[in-house]
Image (tube, rainbow, N blue to C red):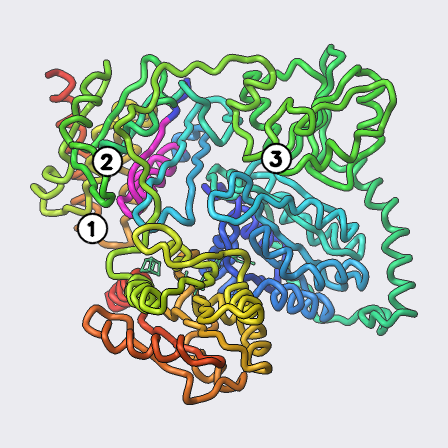
Amino acid sequence: MKTDIILAGVGGQGILSIASCIGVAAMNENLYVKQSELHGMSQRGGAVQSHFRLSDKPVYSDQIPLGEADIILSVEPMEALRYLPWLSAEGMVVTDSTPFINIPNYPEPETITAEIKKLKKHVLIDANSLASEIKSPKSANIVMLGAASKYLQVSFKSLENALEEIFKSKGAAVVDVNKQALNLGREYAEKYIRG
Amino acid sequence: MQKKLLLGVEAIAQGAIDGGLSGVYAYPGTPSTEITEYIESNPVAIERNLHRQWSANEKTAMEAALGMSYAGKRAMVCMKHVGMNVCADAFVNSAVTGINGGIVVVAADDPSMHSSQNEQDSRFYGDFAMITILEPSTQQQAYDMAYSAFEISEKTGLPVLIRITTRLAHSRSTVETKELKSENEVHFPADPRQFVLLPAIAKRRYANLLKMQEVLGDNSEKSTFNTFEDADSKTGIVACGIAYNYLKETFNGAIPYPTLHIGQYPLPIKQIEKLAEKCDEIIVVEEGYPFVEQRIKGISQKIKIKGKLDGTLPRQGELNPDITNEAFGVKSENQYATPELVSPRPPALCQGCSHADMYEVLNQVMQEMGSNRVFGDIGCYTLGALPPYVAINSTVDMGASITMAKGAADSGVKHAVAVIGDSTFVHSGMTGLLDAVIENTPITVIISDNSTTAMTGGQKSHGENRIEKICLGLGVDREHLHIITPMKNKHEEMFKVIKQEVEYQGVSVIISQRECIRTAARKAAKKRANLK
Ligand SMILES: Cc1ncc(C[n+]2csc(CCOP(=O)(O)OP(=O)(O)O)c2C)c(N)n1
Ligand code: SF4
């Protein structure tokens, strides 16, 4: 089995933390991983993306071929759409619904939502509000990870353990709030899918 | 032995540390920067107190590594591909002197120019210097190559070049580490004249380098980094570095053509000849320039060589599995297109960036002067070329703003202005300024000093707190050296100073000084973490 994931967002929105969390979980489950990301110019509010590939067999290419991604996991709705050519026919888009507007020609947010709703499989989630509910707006990215967690080929427990490993140095409170964010995202996505 | 999830560049760093490194010398540059950053914070590197501070530029880095090698220790030099141009003099000559302690040079190429001015292929430099080149295809191989490169270097008495490209540099995978080796002790070259390249000695050294070519070739023939997989077909493949991964992806693990996978150069010519004997055509799949393709074109009359030169593969840009799919007639299927409403999101200066205030005011001045001959340089401030500023007319190579302004002024252009960052200024702007000072050329140099190397992630800048003294030392007239603070409430004052100096017909320097807000935030966060 393999899972190809496109992680998308804007520089500074924390997609690389999502990536390292899945990475740690996958390594602990002895899966093969390749996770490619572009650094550099992307630090200043530009679009950023990462290709994440998990499999129980060796992974060859560091990049996902067009039309083969099982999931696009995005922390920004327009960014989710940017990478649609990579999505497979049966693929799913899981995205935060909150637009990040730092360009003058950002489209009407409703038109973006409408595009996403056209997709057979999608989860739209206001991760910012959910993260604010638990008083940790910075954890919106982890809420998104939780929302996609069911489709990532690693167990939920492994993701929780990965959060623990990654945030341990920042204290128990930070670990807890991120676990809460993960659970919140998971629950919300399940509700969304059920309708 | 440990298992770690590492970027390709981090794997090189870990491999070098485990392979007995004593010092890394580098100037930041995407996608090579994380090699040095990894070593900076690695516990073993800290405990061993390996040299791990940044150098002023790639040339000083290469030379310092050569000094460490002279003293018998193992040194690594890291840079992005264009850094090879800067250190080329030292690099090429280091193959003539040869080494004492092992030297590994890492060049990170950036096909597709994700964050670079060109796509130059560093394998040409390795070939030019006539040394061993290693080109990994996986993170594990990046580790293994860095680990063994010092030994290859010491056995052959020559530096080794590791060439990687952006995708592998910035892709993570699991890496198994090997046993940690000890560092070399200080010991000096057996031949005390080895490093003295006076013609008489240089001739001897060069003869040695030529003689070594056969050995390097033999090493490549035997190298475990060059592998052959047979298949029943009259079409053969030579795949270099990560190009091999894309082929494997295209054919789902089983390439139906006899395939030679190259990881070590000079090319194993005998193996290529063997492949040529059984084939009618060879397709070369390589990232970067058609280096191998050109090299093997004449290998046999009866065989056709295909690749980037005949359009089998695109000449420009990095490879990916969609490209190899197309080249080999395997279909990629995408169901969806990007909806038209999606707009590009190009990088832009951060809100509150000090460069932005400088450009705003500079634009006002230039407008009033009826001139816009502003020469730019490389760094975050290069984004001043884009709207809303559209303030600079050039960006070529580090330091070129000052010297291009000088050349323009020499041609009679009035009000030639250079804009350069602090790190770029100390990298290679200082010598150009000296040229202008000597002739008192009428140029105005604005050093947009944000006290950091922001473009590559905020590394320490050698210019920090030194720019003013350096300019005075180079002979800039005190009267025409100003420091301004680029802030909203100071625009009027800034305007006055910039206008006055742009009008002045001699060398003037304006240091526009305010820390990068991102670097400041990062420093503050680090401080908070340390307090905790
Ligand atoms: C020869 C060479 N080495 C390295 C780089 C990568 N690089 C481009 S600009 C830059 C430094 C920019 O620092 P600074 O001039 O202080 O400007 P800032 O980004 O801080 O605004 C670096 C490291 C390059 N383009 N060319
Ligand atoms: S990182 Fe610093 S220098 Fe670069 S755009 Fe942002 S504030 Fe300006």
Q: Are marks 2 and 3 in contact (CB under 8 Å)?
A: no
Q: Quadrant of residue B20?
A: bottom right
> Percent x, y for residue A64?
44, 26
Q: Quadrant of the N terminus of chain A?
A: top left
Question: Residue at the location (40% across, 18% down)?
Answer: A67
Residue at the disc numbered 3: B287
Question: Residue at the location (21% across, 46% down)?
Answer: A175
SS for callout 1:
helix
Question: Residue at the location (91% across, 57% down)?
Answer: B207
> Tag 1: Cα neighbours inside 10 Å, few (<14), some, or many (≥20)?
few
B400 left or right of B194 in image: left
Residue at the disc numbered 2: A76
- Is A188 magenta? The answer is no
B170 left or right of B431 in image: left
Up/down of B114 relative to B69, above or below: above
> Percent x, y for residue B366?
35, 66
On residue A98, the disc is none
The chain that hosts pointer 2 is A
Boundaries of the magenta span: A5-26
A181 left or right of B33 in image: left
Viewer-side label of 1, 2:
2
SS for callout 2:
loop
> Percent x, y for residue A91?
31, 17
**Amino acid at pointer 2:** Glu
Residue at the disc numbered 1: A172
The chain that hosts pointer 3 is B
Separation (CA) of disc 1 from disc 3: 46 Å
The chain that hosts pointer 1 is A
Up/down of B341 relative to B448, above or below: above
